[in-house]
Amino acid sequence: MIGSRSLFTKAILAVALVASAALAGCAADGGAGGDEVPTFASYEEAKRADGTVWQANNTDTSVELKVLYPSGETAETGDHDVVLLLYDAETDEPITDAEFEPQSEYEQNCGPAHSFCAEMPAMGHGTSPEESPEHVGHGVYQGMTHFSMSGDWVLNVNPLVDGDVLEYDVTITAEGEGEGHGDMEGGMEN
Ligand SMILES: [Cu+2]
């Protein structure tokens, strides 16, 4: 992990972080975390930021989902903020009034309701805690999930947009220690 990084590498990384934060126009708070949750001052900024773009798999819609954080195909295990952008690819306009059903409890099998739920399909379990995304401006939504173990996850992102539940299956590989299934006792009964 990061334990053996040289000072030189750290310095380069710090410079790169400051530079990218400045370019992105985000209000860096000076933290040296290197894994800051991004914020966006405009729709255009979010639209051109790093991320992965997903199409709805249940209906033919021009509404696309861009996952801005984690911005790649992998994420660290543990609690993880999730930042999403919803926009209409035809009109190039942000979707600012999508709704997610509030996350109330552990879901072992993620339902199709307008919700937000991570699961490991190969192992048949979900996770907890999770927080449904809420609009933070410019079509950007922020929520959180918990990758309780390393491996392949599907993040079900199912927003209600103009009366339709759109289903996006975002695949993410979690890497890191994880704590196995132990922390999900109580939620794992069959
Ligand atoms: Cu698992």
Image (spheres, rainbow, N blue to C red):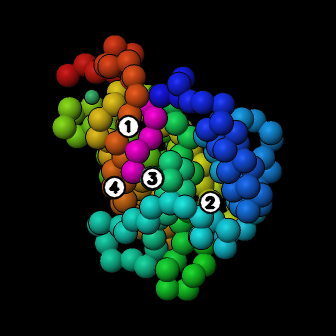
Q: Is mark 1 within 8 Å of ligand 1?
A: no
Identify whether 84 is placed above or below 90: above
The C terminus is located in which quarter? top left
Q: Secondary structure at mark 2?
A: strand
Which callout, 1 or 4, points to the residue nearer the camera? 1
- Which label's residue is closer to the chain start, 1 or 4? 4
**Residue 74 part of the magenta segment:** yes
**Residue 158 part of the magenta segment:** no
- Residue under label 2, please give it: 140
- Residue under label 1, please give it: 174
- Residue under label 3, please give it: 72
Identify whether 16 is placed above or below 14: below
Q: Nearer the viewer, residue 21 or 133?
A: 21
Query: Disc 2, disc 3: CB below 8 Å?
Result: no
- Residue under label 4, please give it: 169
Q: Is mark 3 within 8 Å of ligand 1?
A: no
